[in-house]
């Protein structure tokens, strides 16, 4: 039997010995990947008595790729991930202000991994800056291919920036560019198709996981045709494709305008009592306040690329930080997916065997669940809970916990394996 994962009629077919490409990553990547892969392998071995085993295949990206091949993201890496469908990666460095564009973003764009899925929940015993971290249980659906992350930017003073500014001024009468001589220019594409496939995935997830609401987060009051478009298209999609399963605030407003507030309240209450999912929206700035003050009100969150990047780190902080925040980049149509930590390369800790491997490990748990290997996934999750509850933790948690025993990244993995 082939050891390739394939999609057949929209369903993943996973052999017992699937080949899964991995990118080790820059900075802390080698430390956390070594630790996390040991735990994943041990859990799979234990859960299936050796009947299943992942055949890891290293593919290169980032500094390791550049040093070995002269390329930051070799075509062979993209080809292998394309071929084997599912991959996992450590973080990759992106220089600020100049140099290469993000390899992380490039991977998502080139494989069209349009959903960045980032579940955020609290693990018992994890130290948190908020009083009730257990109230945070949200799943972020971040659009992963559009927005200002498309990388269409022109430097201040460049011929391109000047041409665009001149064009805007002469063709469209734009007179609002405050300092036209020295402005850099960025372009923010947000499309109906891009919004629809993201919001569709978020609503399907809410239906499949029995989540009561989907919140569209946007800044549509200011960016009317990009972020405002996202909100409009999101509501339209819910009402068109999920009419029987959802009730939207858009519908609430229409009923209120025609029949008054009482009728709108009743329609919403009836819809929710019938098990429909509430599709609502929130403007991004107040959303960042409300996830802190009343996190109970939010479940599935659908948003654009930049908002999703900010929201995922902010929410991660409420449940213990990015050291424990997992993620996945998925194309639900082709079946391609790359699982990856939410955090970056934390260069100051590179090579110190110090940081928390939980983010990439829990991304591995998402991967195991995606493969249908739920037993192994549950085993890792339970071990993380047990190990943290026993107060054996890496530096990031130890500095916030009384009476904790601080261990290295590799020692934490060994403890996790013991607790499987
Ligand atoms: N998907 C990806 O590959 C991503 C890549 N990046 C890239 O990473 C580089 C560094 O980015 P930076 O903004 O410094 O953000 P990082 O996420 O790399 O690090 C910021 C801080 O977060 C904490 N942290 C990160 N990872 C861990 C971990 N595993 N365990 C414990 N604590 C952790 C550390 O906090 P403390 O100092 O408090 O100990 C660290 O100093 C940049 O080039 C950036 O572009 C960034 C995000 C995602
Ligand atoms: O690609 C990068 O360097 C940063 C990306 C990022 O912060 C994220 O995807 O969360
Ligand atoms: Mg980020």
Image (tube, rainbow, N blue to C red):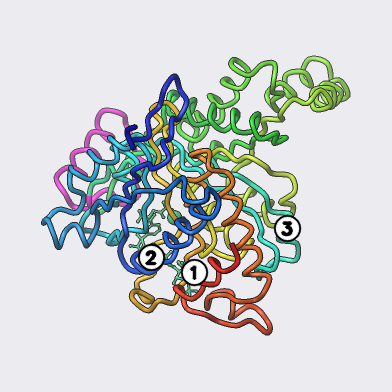
170 part of magenta stretch = yes
Q: Tell me: 8 left or right of 236.
A: left
Residue 145 in percent (x, y) is at 37, 37
Gap between marks 1 and 2 measured at Cα: 9 Å
Precedes in sequence: disc 3 or disc 1: 3
Q: Compare residues 259 and 420 and report the one nearer the observer.
A: 420
Q: Tell me: 90 left or right of 390.
A: left
Residue 168 in percent (x, y) is at 28, 34
The residue indicated by pointer 2 is: 34
Does 263 appear above or below 57? above
Does 172 appear above or below 105? above
Question: Mark 2 against mark 3, which lies toward the viewer?
Answer: 2
Magenta residues, start to end: 155-181
The reply to whether the C-beta atoms of the residues labelled 1 and 2 are less than 8 Å apart is yes
Precedes in sequence: disc 1 or disc 2: 2
Helix or strand or loop: what does disc 2 sit on? helix
Question: Which corner quadrant holds the N terminus?
Answer: top left
The residue indicated by pointer 3 is: 134
Circle 2 Cα neighbour tier, 10 Å, few/some/many (<14 / 14–19 / ≥20): some
Camera sees residue 190: yes
Precedes in sequence: disc 2 or disc 3: 2
- Identity of the residue drawn at 71% across and 61% down: 133
Helix or strand or loop: what does disc 3 sit on? helix
Question: Mark 3 against mark 1, which lies toward the viewer?
Answer: 1
346 part of magenta stretch = no
- Identity of the residue drawn at 32% across and 33% down: 2
Q: Compare residues 227 and 149 and report the one nearer the observer.
A: 149
The reply to whether the C-beta atoms of the residues labelled 3 and 1 are less than 8 Å apart is no
The residue indicated by pointer 1 is: 413
- Identity of the residue drawn at 60% across and 42% down: 283
Q: Is mark 2 within 8 Å of ligand 1?
A: no
Circle 3 Cα neighbour tier, 10 Å, few/some/many (<14 / 14–19 / ≥20): some
């Amino acid at each position: 039997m082939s050891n390739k994962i394939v999609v057949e009629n929209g369903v993943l077919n996973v052999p017992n010995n699937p080949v899964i490409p991995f990118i080790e990553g820059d900075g802390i990547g080698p430390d956390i990947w070594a630790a996390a892969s040991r735990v994943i392998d041990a859990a799979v071995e234990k859960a299936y008595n050796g009947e299943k085993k992942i055949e890891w295949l290293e593919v290169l990206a980032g500094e390791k790729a550049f040093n070995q091949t002269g390329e930051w993201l070799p075509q062979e890496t993209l080809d292998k991930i394309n071929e084997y469908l599912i991959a996992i990666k450590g973080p990759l460095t992106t220089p600020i202000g100049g140099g290469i564009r993000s390899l992380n973003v490039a991977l998502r764009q080139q494989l069209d991994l349009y959903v960045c899925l980032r579940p955020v929940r609290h693990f018992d015993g994890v130290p948190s800056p908020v009083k009730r971290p257990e109230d945070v249980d949200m799943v972020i659906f971040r659009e992963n291919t559009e927005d200002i992350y498309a990388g269409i930017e022109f430097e201040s003073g460049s011929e391109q920036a000047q041409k665009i500014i001149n064009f805007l001024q002469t063709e469209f009468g734009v007179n609002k560019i405050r300092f036209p001589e020295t402005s850099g220019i960025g372009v923010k594409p947000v499309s109906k198709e891009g919004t629809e496939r993201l919001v569709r995935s978020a609503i399907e997830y809410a239906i499949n996981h029995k989540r009561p609401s989907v919140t569209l987060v946007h800044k549509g009051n200011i960016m009317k045709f990009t972020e405002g478009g996202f909100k409009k298209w999101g509501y339209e999609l819910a009402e068109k494709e999920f009419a029987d399963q959802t009730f939207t605030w858009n519908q609430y407003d229409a009923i209120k305008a025609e029949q008054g507030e009482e009728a709108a309240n009743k329609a919403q209450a009836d819809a929710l009592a019938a098990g429909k999912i509430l599709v609502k929206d929130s403007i991004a700035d107040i959303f960042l306040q409300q996830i802190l003050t009343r996190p109970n009100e939010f479940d599935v969150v659908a948003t654009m690329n930049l908002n999703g990047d900010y929201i995922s780190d902010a929410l991660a902080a409420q449940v213990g930080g990015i050291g424990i925040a997992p993620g996945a980049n998925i194309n639900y149509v082709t079946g391609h997916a790359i699982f990856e930590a939410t955090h970056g390369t934390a260069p100051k800790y590179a090579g110190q065997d110090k940081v928390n491997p939980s983010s990439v490990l829990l991304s591995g748990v998402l991967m195991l669940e995606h493969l249908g290997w739920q037993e192994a996934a549950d085993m890792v999750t339970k071990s993380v809970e047990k190990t943290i509850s026993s107060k054996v933790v890496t530096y990031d948690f130890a500095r916030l916990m009384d009476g904790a025993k601080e261990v290295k990244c590799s020692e934490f993995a060994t403890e996790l394996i013991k607790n499987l």
